[in-house]
Amino acid sequence: MGVTGLDKIKTLQRNPANIRNLCILAHVDHGKTTLADCLVANNGIISSRLAGKLRYLDSREDEQVRGITMKSSAISLHYSTGNQEYLLNLIDSPGHVDFSSEVSTAVRLCDGAIVVVDAVEGVCPQTQVVLRQAWLENIRPVLVINKMDRLIMELKLTALEAYTHLQKILEQVNAVTGTLFTSKVLEERAEKVKEEVNRDKDPSGDQVYDWSAGLEDADDSHLYFSPDQGNVVFASAIDGWGFSIQHFAHIYSQKMGIRTEVLLKTLWGDFYLNTKIQRIMKGAQTKGKKPLFVQLVLDNIWSLYDAVITRRDKQKVEKVMTSLGIKVMTRDLRHSDPKVLLFAICNQWLPVSKAVLSMVCEKLPSPLEMTAEKVEKLMSVGTRRFDSLPERTQELKTAFLQCSSEINAPVIIFVSKMFAVDTKALPQKRQRPLNQEEITQRREVARQRHAEKLAAESLERATRSCSAPGEATMTRLPLKPEEEEEQKEVFIAFARIYSGTVKKGQRVFVLGPKYDPAQGLSLLPEGSSTSDCIPEVPHLSCCTVENLYLLMGRELEELEEIPAGNVMGIGGLEDCVLKTATLSASLACSPFTPLNFEAAPIVRVAVEPKHPSEMPKLVSGMRLLNQADPCVEVLIQETGEHVLVTAGEVHLQRCLDDLRERFAKIEISVSKPIIPFRETVVRPPKVDMVNEELGKQQKVAVIHQVKEELSQGRSSDCQHVDPDGLVTLTTPNRLATVCVRAIPLPQEVTVLLERNSEVIRTLELMNSSLREGRAMDINLRTLEAIAELKDHLQSLLQGRKWRNAVERIWAFGPRRYGPNILLNSIKDYSRPSVWQCLEWRHSNDQVRAPASPLRDFDNSIISGFQLVTLSGPMCEEPLMGVCFSVERWDVESVAFSQNPDTLKEDSVSPEALQDVNSHGNSEDVIAERKMDASSVDCYGPVSGQLIAAMKEACRHAFQAQPQRLMAAMYTCEIMATAEVLGRVYGVLGKREGRVLHEEMKEGTDMFIITAVLPVAESFGFADEIRKRTSGLASPQLVFSHWEVISSDPYWVPTTEEEYLHFGEKADSVNQALKYMNAVRRRKGLFVEEKIVEHAEKQRTLGKNK
Ligand SMILES: Nc1nc2c(ncn2[C@@H]2O[C@H](COP(=O)(O)OP(=O)(O)OP(=O)(O)O)[C@@H](O)[C@H]2O)c(=O)[nH]1
Ligand SMILES: [Mg+2]
């Protein structure tokens, strides 16, 4: 464990004022792991010669092979400066967008972060994301501008140009921070104003609020990165150097006799040195002088590179070394690679580890400095506000702030992820050097065993001669239990302790994310502890902390206890913690807010074992994988397939490798990625596929098609389709009729609904608890969000067609919160609005709509709607952006008398609905049988028939409109040089990509291309781009939105010209049809295709004549 002993670390752990918990964040490949290497080398854990080459924290084999980090890993380092000694718990995180969930798990445990930016590439998409994540978790960042050597060697900039370039990068980074800050201030301001308005309920006075006022008052100077603030380091991790301007300020204040404070203020900025009067003056730029930073700092570095690398001028190098007082080994001096000499000089002159570590110790907060705001944020989950928590829970805030490790301080721990390690890697299993006594003992044992073996062999020989030959094979020894155990993976919790001291063997409560401290405190007797036999409390369990570890990158060190403020590993929690958890010794503690994940898993594949008998192994392997990865989703689809959902292609590959080699240890076959689509309807298009104007005939054709379909197979006397798309459907028992029309929602509305799915889900929860008469603790902010959504919808749904539509919304779907709307357009049917929770607040009483007999069946209509939106008629994919407007709905009075008791509210839960095999069911129900009123009940409850009828009516209404498929789209930013630009465009074009814009990165010859690309076409995209550009461009794909594919999958050519153009079925160019058929084929649905049976007959003879 390097030069720092375990005892030293244990002592340091007890002094939270000198602990820094920090992570390294950046865009992919900006040099995080290389920088971490330099810091690790400073501790003697690896040799400084290997720093930057070893990538010590990338401990997985695939990380080393691919050269990217995939898991975040932590290491504890010791650093002493002056008379202070610090303990740094450093976490290296991945930069690839597929692994951004690992960043979230790292950021949660830290108080500060080192944000690394590549000096050439500047701010990239992931840089913005990580800055945002740091911001959301209230952690303080410092900046390292890395790869400075590229400015010298690759871009060949002069020192002055480099200075201008660096200024621009700083501006970019600060612009991102600025935006985050402004939005927060405005939000807080808005909240304050609203609270004020709520307080003085005097609506008479017109008040004008000045929205910018908050911005001017708020102090944001500490937020920005600026070298003179001491929070920026310029570095080249690979060459081992780095500095902050403090370093040079100290040197030059001695040399030039200028005060350090003056230098600190002027070394960065528009200042220059007037040599005549030996004073620092302002206005370097206007006077055409060299800024101080260039003259005193950059020029030195530039000339060193020039002497060592470019000109290899030995004499000059020696001169520089004597002036700097540096001695390097002759071996380095004579090395054929000048980089070795450069590293040796720079590492002594401007050691990067010292520059970064002293900045970290000085600028990043210790666990003691945690802000009250952060604590409140951590403790208030979902709709619960901090001040609505029980008093005893609120008191725990002081425990967080004090970060005390006294015996009476409550233990509070947060586990941000579980990671798997091989049993062999555990310190308990690790081999340690044997002492003399043990060696003798072992020798004795071995001797004995050998003697036994000889004896057994001679015995066997004797018995074999007198027994049948087959029997001997029966006496095989079973597999030793040790060997079995060796193959096991154990899970270690990646955690941080916020208060108290946790000891090995201690029992703690495990608080699930839904645990409510108020409930826990009321159900359990005062002062009950984990050792008591506690009654059942929802989302609460107990566990024992079996092992405690110090995380040292690839290794773990066992510890007996760990005091507050430290990052650590905990063993023995795998059975009670799945991915994250809050552990506490106090029942009053509330669970921490869930992690902010930036990327949602989107790439799905189905997996199955090569040999079907190994299914149980696969299942348990997938369970382990699910636990070991924060972002992966493992599920069993309705079809029975085992499905893995991952964040992207690289992530998928890693998960499959893990499954094959670590968790299941079997061969598996993997399906092609399952690409999600959405189905929607659009307004009738004005032009057709060949850009010719369309008249009314299109619409008529669509309706005609639906009618034809209806009349095939089943009698159509139950259904009727109007020419304008209104579908009327009667249940088979003739007791109920519904009239439905499908209308496309404006695109903005769909986007709005999608973005607010969480809000709608909460709205639905509130409504259901209101219906059941349960009181609910409602957060003011949630209500505001709902009201805002309503207003927004109102402003978007304008025009005659949407008059009063927002008030008439009946439900959202699928799953009650999706981006489709059910509208109540029935003249004489009123029901409580979906917005009732807003009104309920004002009247403090439940709003009841006038009772109507139809109300009993209300839920059947909603259920039918949920079913149809979950899987549409095109290829059974969910719908999106469709509004179903119910225009008429009758239920015969016989129905009420016949089935009065079957129809309770919520009789069909949404979960149950998902399980229903929708297609099969509906066809059973709508059987074609004529019937009379007397045999009504042979069809079962009316509500069931109504669900099916509603679903069928919606499906037909959907089909009566022009249908379209929607594809999931990625955005990607590709950085490429001018030479390879053409190839990038080629690949994008081939894969249906669309370039949004292209711009030149200032100061470089790089172009930045922003493009969108369908997910369906994205597999292998990054690889192809990399290959075609010889590795010069590598894109990162991020899910962005859903987009309607403009081509009509049902279009068939009708005119001669169209036949010529597209062929008989027009399937060669119809992208939507291709996608649709692919999905139908995968799901085993009917696909209408022409199969060429006799190819020779179809040959075009004309050409061969
Ligand atoms: N020229 C130059 N190259 C560097 C420097 N630092 C790192 N690199 C190179 O950049 C590449 C990526 O470095 P890593 O440290 O793996 O980058 P990372 O940020 O950890 O990457 P991910 O973890 O995958 O996000 C490697 O090839 C390094 O050798 C530097 O200061 N100068
Ligand atoms: Mg890395």
Image (cartoon, rainbow, N blue to C red):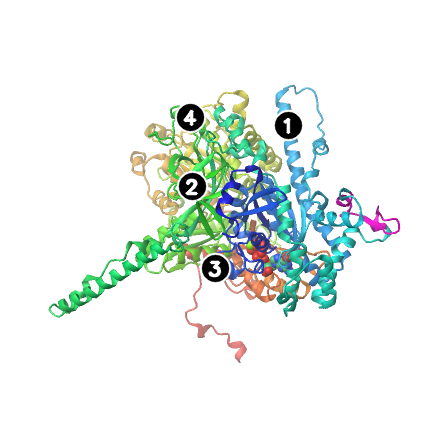
Query: Residue 471: x, y in percent?
Result: 15, 65
Label 1 sits on a secondary structure element that is helix
Read off the residue under disc 3: 61
Q: For the magenta stretch, what is the residue range? A: 262-286
Whole-angstrom CA distance, mark 3 to mark 2, is: 31 Å
Q: Which is nearer the N-term, disc 1 or disc 3?
A: 3
Q: Where is residue 216, by image quadrant?
A: top right
Query: Residue 724: x, y in percent?
Result: 53, 43
Label 3 sits on a secondary structure element that is helix
Q: Where is residue 667, by image quadrant?
A: bottom left
Q: Does the magenta run of residues contain 283?
A: yes
Mark seen at residue 521: 4
Say whether marks 3 and 2 touch (CB < 8 Å): no
Amino acid carrying mark 1 in the image? Lys
Read off the residue under disc 1: 192
The residue at the point 35 percent across, 60 percent down is 610
Q: Residue furthest left?
A: 466
1078 versus 725 height, above or below: below
Whether residue 1036 is visible, yes or no, is no
Whole-angstrom CA distance, mark 3 to mark 4, is: 48 Å
How would you rate the neighbour count of disc 1 (Cα within 10 Å): few for under 14, some for 14-19, many for 20 or more?
Answer: few
- Name the residue nearer the viewer: 120 or 747: 120
Q: Which is nearer the N-term, disc 4 or disc 2?
A: 4
Amino acid carrying mark 3 in the image? Glu
Amino acid carrying mark 4 in the image? Leu
